[in-house]
C-alpha cells in the first residue's frame, strides 16, 4: 500500500470540498473494493475522504412511486429493510445475495454503483429500473450513468448521495453466482413498468447493458417462452477460465427466463 492521508468528513459539504481541492483524493465507503485495490498497489490516491457516518447519505424511504436509498446504505440494510421489501422485493432479494455476510455488512449501495464492476449486482437494478443517481452536483439517469467496465458518468470527486428507484409494477432479479465470490457470472434484472419492459444484464459483458431484443419479445408476451428462442449476441461478452462467451450468453438467457417466470409467479 502506498502512503495516503485519511480524512473523515463531518458533512457532505465538507467531503465535497475536500475532494474538489485534490484531484487525486478518493471517497471511501465500505472499502470492500477500494482497500484491496490499495493493498495491491493498483491505485495511489493522495487522500481517502471517509464518507461513513454522513447523515446526508443515509436513509431509506418511499415517496409517491419512488424508493430512495442513501448511498451509504449497506447491502445488509437493504436486504433487511421492511420498506424495501414491501416496495421493491426484487431489490431486497438482490442485496441479500451479494457476496458473503462480511461484504454485505460493509459494502454500500453508493460504493457499488460508483465502482461499476462489470459483475456487480446493483447496476442491473439501477439500469433495469432506469433509476436516478443523485450526486452532490446533479441527477444522472441510469441510461447515461453506466459507461462500460468500471466507468461511469461521475466526475472526479463527485459523490453519489442517493439512488432514486421508480417503483415498477413488477420486477425480479435472477443471477448465476460465481461460486467463490458471489459476483454474477450472469445476472438479469427484469422490470415491468408503466413505460414498458426493461431487461438489464450484468456479469456477462464488460459492463451492465440492456438486452433490447428480450425487451421487445417480452412486450409482445410477458412469458419466459417468449425469449426461449432468442440468442444473446456473444461477440462482445466476457470470456475467461470460468466460462466462454457462448456459455455466458446462454446463462444470461436462462437468468432472464427465470426472472420472467418469477414475475409471473411461476417459480
Ligand atoms: C469477496 C467479495 C465479494 C463480493 N461479491 C459481490 C457480489 O456478489 N455482488 C456485488 O455486486 N458486489 C460484490 N462485491 C463488491 C461489494 O459488494 C461492494 O459493494 C463494492 O466492493 C464497493 O462498495 P464499497 O461501499 O465497499 O465501496 P468502496 O470500496 O469504499 O469504494 C469503491 C469505489 O467507489 C468510490 N465510492 C465509494 N462511495 C462513493 C460514493 N458515495 N460516491 C462516489 N464514489 C464512491 C470509491 O472512491 C472507490 O473508487 C464483493 C466484494 C468482495 C470483496
Image: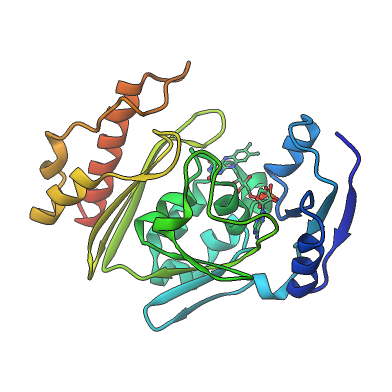
Residue 223, horizontal then vertical, whole percent: 13, 50
Horizontal side of residue 79 vs 176, given as left or right = right
Horizontal side of residue 262 vs 47, given as left or right = left
Foreground of the two, 147 or 75: 147
Horizontal side of residue 30 vs 178, given as left or right = right
Q: Is residue 187 above or below residue 133?
A: above
Which residue is rendered at x = 16% and y = 45% of the image?
224
Quadrant of the drawing holding the N terminus = top right
Residue 78, horizontal then vertical, whole percent: 54, 62
Foreground of the two, 245 or 137: 137
Which residue is rendered at x = 82% and y = 67% of the image?
9
Residue extending farthest top:
241
Residue 264, horizontal then vertical, whole percent: 19, 56
Horizontal side of residue 105 vs 219, given as left or right = right
| Colouring rule applied to residues | rainbow
Quarter of the image where one finds residue 245: top left
Foreground of the two, 104 or 54: 54
Which residue is rendered at x = 29% and y = 26% of the image?
234
Residue 113, horizontal then vertical, whole percent: 55, 53
Quarter of the image where one finds residue 40: top right
Residue extending farthest left:
220
Which residue is rendered at x = 42% and y = 64% of the image?
131
Q: Is residue 82 above or below residue 32?
A: below
Label tally? 0
Q: Is residue 73 above or below residue 223?
A: below
Foreground of the two, 173 or 119: 119
Q: Is residue 188 above or below residue 165?
A: above
Amino acid at each position: 500500500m502506498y502512503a495516503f492521508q485519511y480524512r473523515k468528513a463531518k458533512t457532505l459539504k465538507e467531503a465535497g470540498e475536500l475532494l474538489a481541492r485534490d484531484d487525486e483524493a478518493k471517497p471511501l465507503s465500505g472499502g470492500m473494493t477500494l482497500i484491496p485495490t490499495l493493498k495491491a498497489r493498483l491505485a495511489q490516491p493522495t487522500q481517502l475522504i471517509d464518507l461513513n457516518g454522513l447523515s446526508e447519505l443515509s436513509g431509506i424511504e418511499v415517496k409517491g412511486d419512488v424508493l430512495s436509498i442513501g448511498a451509504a446504505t449497506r447491502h445488509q440494510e437493504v436486504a433487511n429493510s421492511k420498506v424495501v421489501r414491501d416496495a421493491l422485493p426484487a431489490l431486497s432479494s438482490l442485496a441479500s445475495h451479494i457476496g458473503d455476510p462480511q461484504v454485505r455488512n460493509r459494502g454500500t449501495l453508493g460504493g457499488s454503483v460508483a465502482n461499476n464492476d462489470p459483475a456487480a449486482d446493483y447496476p442491473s437494478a439501477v439500469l433495469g429500473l432506469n433509476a436516478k443517481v443523485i450526486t452532490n452536483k446533479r441527477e444522472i439517469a441510469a441510461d447515461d450513468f453506466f459507461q462500460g467496465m468500471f466507468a461511469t458518468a461521475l466526475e472526479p470527486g463527485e459523490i453519489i448521495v442517493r439512488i432514486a428507484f421508480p417503483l415498477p409494477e413488477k420486477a425480479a432479479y435472477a443471477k448465476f453466482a460465481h461460486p467463490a465470490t458471489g459476483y454474477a457470472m450472469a445476472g438479469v434484472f427484469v422490470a415491468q413498468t408503466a413505460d414498458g419492459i426493461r431487461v438489464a444484464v450484468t456479469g456477462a459483458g464488460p459492463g451492465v447493458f440492456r438486452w433490447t431484443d428480450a425487451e421487445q419479445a417480452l412486450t409482445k408476451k410477458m412469458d419466459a417462452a417468449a425469449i426461449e428462442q432468442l440468442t444473446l449476441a456473444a461477440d462482445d461478452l466476457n470470456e475467461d477460465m470460468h466460462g466462454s462467451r457462448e456459455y455466458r450468453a446462454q446463462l444470461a438467457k436462462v437468468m432472464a427466463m427465470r426472472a420472467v417466470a418469477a414475475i409471473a409467479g411461476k417459480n
